[in-house]
Amino acid sequence: AEVKKEETATATATAVPKKDNSFFGLLSKGSSSSTAVKEEVVVEKKKKIVQPAKKKAEPIATKKQEEKKQEKEQQQQEEETKKSEDKAGFFSFFNKAPKIDTDTSTTKEEEEDNTIQIDMSSIVMPHPAKVSWGGEDAVLTKGRNFGVFDGVSGADKLDGVPLYSATLAGELKKSVGEDPLSIRDMTKFLTDAAEFADVSATGASTAIVGSLTEDGKLSVLNLGDSTCVVVRDDKVIAKTNEINHFFDCPYQLSDDSPDRPRQGTQLNMKVQKGDVVIMGSDGIFDNLTEEQILATVNSGAERASLLAKKIANISRKVSFDETANTPYAKLAKKNGFEDYESGLGGKVDDISCVVVRCK
């Protein structure tokens, strides 16, 4: 630094004589004695200017260097402090990370615990007069999908031709997979099955199809007078709506019926563990009151297969009782049916039922 300052001082001192030299040169044009005087002045100015510049530069340079050095050290110290703080902050973030991961893990486990497992079973009990050929009802249970297809007794049928209800159930079993269906999927698959049955089966059938997702969403499509109920804490908390043209004439699928699956009523709801879903033909819900169904659910039949069988057996028993207080008898009396003038009595019919226990 001292050498640089010295060079700078010399350069400055040299520059001044050049200006003075030029100035004296102008004054002494054409005179040799004045040239000699000019040279002496130049030399003298060099001595006078160079020496003081060198002496003054040294302390200034040293002071500035010291200040710069201190400034640089302070800056380095500040940078190191900042790096230390950043480093500490960086690791403190990762020290907290495992805690967040643990919380997330717990949440995932809780979500897995909320997955709805199902115990599903079905039963078909033919009308006593139709036992030899299996009756007119059919059921579907596949994966998380289920359905009941109630053959219409009054529809014309051809011998040796598959029943419409059984054909619907068979075609749907081929079409649907193990995964749950949306209402849109149900409508499409049921429509395709009906179109196939129109040209290959005989008779007519109502249809009710349901599906239950792992997170508990229950979806049901109902065309006709079959029913699906959800039981929770000794109460029926949800029930599908029937759809009829008039009493004892439900919406139905057949080759000469204008009714189609898109016209069906819908049920969409969330179920939870402990809920029981019961889907059945009118052979069950025409004979059993809501109170009788709840009593049967609470009778100790823990497995779905036992509960389905119990519901079917009680329905059959009530159907033979001419003094039973049944939902069907009340409606029949209201609509002027002579056989039910008293408003009492069961209705003998095919019985089909699907039970889904949510676990």
Image (tube, rainbow, N blue to C red):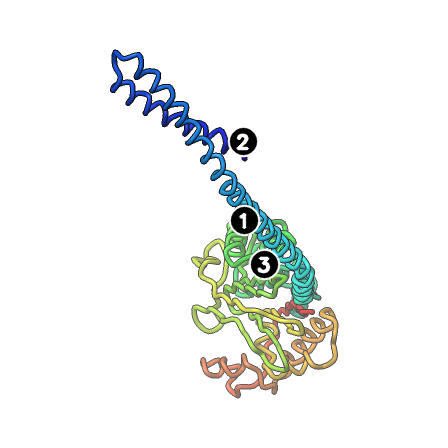
Tag 1 near tag 3, CB within 8 Å: no
Q: Earlier in the sequence, mark 2 or mark 1?
A: 2
Q: Residues within 10 Å of mark 1 (few under 14, many from 20)?
A: few
Position above or below: 312 against 32:
below
Q: Position of residue 42 (x, y in %)?
A: 38, 23
Residue 220, picture quadrant: bottom right
State which quadrant residue 324 falls in: bottom right
Say which residue label 3 marks.
165
Instruction: Name the residue carrying label 2.
Output: 3
Question: Given contact means CB atoms under 8 Å apart, are the residues at marks 2 and 3 in contact?
Answer: no
Sequence-first tag of 1 and 3? 1
Residue type, numbered disc 1: Glu
Label 3 CA crowd tier, 10 Å (few <14, some 14–19, many 20+): many
Left or right of 32, for residue 81: right
- Residue 71 numbered tag: 1
Query: Residue 202, percent across and down?
Result: 55, 54
169 is higher (above) or lower (below) than 225: above
CA–CA distance in space, label 2 to label 1:
23 Å
Give the CA distance from mark 1 to mark 3: 94 Å
Q: Position of residue 278 (x, y in %)?
A: 62, 71
Q: Classify the position of the C terminus by image quarter.
A: bottom right
Q: Is residue 69 visible?
A: yes
Label 2–label 1 contact, CB within 8 A: no
Q: Residue at x 51, y 31 (%)?
A: 4
| Dot 3: element | helix
Q: Which residue is more in the foreground, 273 or 257?
A: 273
- Label 3 amino acid? Ser
Q: Of 293 and 179, which appears nearest the observer?
A: 179
Placement of 25 over or under 258, stated as above or below? above
Marks 2 and 3 sit apart, C-alpha to C-alpha, by 110 Å
**Number of marks in picture:** 3
